Amino acid sequence: MRKPIIAGNWKMHKTIIESVDLVNDLKVSLADVSPDDITVIVAPVFTSLYAVHEVLSKHWIKLSAQNLFWEEKGAYTGEISPSMLTDCGCNYCIIGHSERRQYFGETDESVNRKIRAALHFGLSPIVCVGESLDQRESSQTFQVIEKQIRGGFSDISSLQMGNITIAYEPIWAIGTGKTATPEQANEVHAYIRKLISQLYDSKTADQQCIQYGGSVKPNNVNSLMEKPDIDGALVGGASLEAESFTSLVLGTLKAYSKA
Ligand code: PGA
């Protein structure tokens, strides 16, 4: 049985004080939720990580970074290493978000190096894949996803896949208010699961957590989470307020039940 994961990607938003306020609010609004039923993650900016970690100390909400560099230390001005993130209390790291691929030149190869470094230092990667509007309109969606998965997960074992979450995020749905329909999303999730079963085995594929991301909101979360291959969400805009993020967690708990 897979457990859903709701992760809030705060992107480049919030000061330290604002970040601390939001997690304090979430601790209250999610007080009745059990971590046995759902994994909840917040991914603040680097500068807020340690302060949020202190507020979450001993709490079940998990902490994620939004990016890392694969080297442990050295002359890499402006970069952050995996061990620096665990030092800040991180358990997860988002890797290969489409904004990083689009604006910062990340490739399947750099994504692969980052995944391997994260795993080596005990961080669980949340790995993003997804097609652009042009690619979808020219029927290349599956081809693009296959290339991202084969490249990103090269030399990753089935055991390591158990520590990885895949986030399917169609680029055309991110921050645009245009969500993929539950059917469109599930079709790609099922394709990813089939690919994982071909690259690994059916047990690994059955256990693989695959989140959807792209304009997930309180009014569409239930219909997405009801779909058999959708195991939670990676959320941008709606994760910035306690009320909407809490609705996503509660909506997922209500709609998600997969054997
Ligand atoms: P959005 O962002 O929910 O604002 O569309 C999702 C993401 O980029 O992870």
Image (spheres, rainbow, N blue to C red):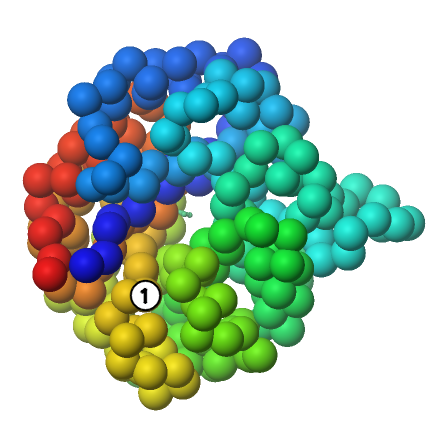
**Vertical position of residue 157 compared to residue 41: above or below:** below
Residue located at (55% from left, 19% from top)? 54
State the image coordinates of residue 4 (x, y, percent, origin top left): 25, 49
Which residue is labeled 1 in the image?
A: 208
**Vertical position of residue 178 compared to residue 251: above or below:** below
Quadrant of the rendering where the C terminus is positioned: bottom left
Rendering quarter of residue 204: bottom left
On the rendered structure, is 147 left or right of 115? left
Amino acid type assigned to the residue bearing label 1 in the image: Gln
**Vertical position of residue 94 compared to residue 245: above or below:** below
Residue located at (77% from left, 56% from top)? 71
> From where the camera sits, is residue 78 visible?
yes
Secondary structure, mark 1, is loop
Rendering quarter of residue 35: top left
Q: How many marks?
A: 1
Residue located at (40% from left, 58% from top)? 165
**Vertical position of residue 125 compared to residue 183: above or below:** above
Question: In what quadrant does ligand 1 lie?
Answer: top left
State the image coordinates of residue 166 (x, y, percent, origin top left): 39, 61
Identity of the residue furthest to the bottom in this view? 198
Mark 1, Cα crowd under 10 Å, few <14 / some 14-19 / many 20+, is: many
Please tell me which residue lies in front, 112 or 86.
Answer: 86
> From where the camera sits, is residue 103 visible?
no
State the image coordinates of residue 213 (x, y, percent, origin top left): 33, 52
Quadrant of the rendering where the N terminus is positioned: bottom left
Please tell me which residue lies in front, 209 or 158.
Answer: 158
State the image coordinates of residue 70 (x, y, percent, origin top left): 71, 57
Residue located at (63% from left, 31% from top)? 88
